Image (spheres, helix red, strand yellow):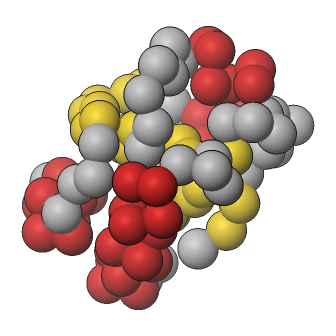
Amino acid sequence: MADVTDQTFDAEVLQSDKPVLVDFWAVWCGPCQVQGPIVEEVAAAVGDKAKVLKLNVDENPVNAQKYGIMSIPTLMVFNGGNVTKQFIGVTSKDTLLAELNK
């Protein structure tokens, strides 16, 4: 699992040839601390079939604003450069894997 920034977002997410799960989070966010290990488990489970990235909304406000992130954690699945699914709040490993494996 890797971090993505406003500078690398287009190349890493929008131009990816694989599905991408982006975890929009912040250091001070309690639920984000709960979601973090779940996202790491998802990354390990999908291997190279999909990308799993984290975007710190405090350090990267451009994409947080572009995608209307009002609550964190927000997890978005991108496919072919488009958002195909959005989850707000702590989301289970099974739910995330089911979406990435579609």
Instruction: Tell me: residue 20, above or below residue 2.
Output: above
- Is residue 41 in view? yes
Instruction: Tell me: residue 60, above or below residue 55.
Output: above
Q: In which quarter of the image is residue 8?
A: top right
Quarter of the rendering occupied by the N terminus? bottom right
Q: Where is residue 80 drawn, in percent x and y?
A: 45, 35
Q: In this view, does 65 lie to the left or right of 89?
A: right
Q: Is residue 41 left or right of residue 30?
A: left
Instruction: Tell me: residue 38, above or below residue 80.
Output: below
At horizontal 47% and vertical 19% (from top left) the residue drawn is: 70
Q: Farthest residue in the right direction?
A: 7
Q: Nearer the viewer, residue 6 or 13?
A: 6
Q: Is residue 35 left or right of residue 92?
A: right
Q: Where is residue 33 drawn, in percent x and y?
A: 48, 64
Q: Where is residue 49 drawn, in percent x and y?
A: 39, 72
At horizontal 53% and vertical 49% (from top left) the residue drawn is: 29
At horizontal 50% and vertical 22% (from top left) the residue drawn is: 69
Q: Quadrant of residue 92?
A: bottom left
Q: Where is residue 21 drawn, in percent x and y?
A: 43, 52
- Is residue 78 in view? no
**Number of marks in the rendered image:** 0
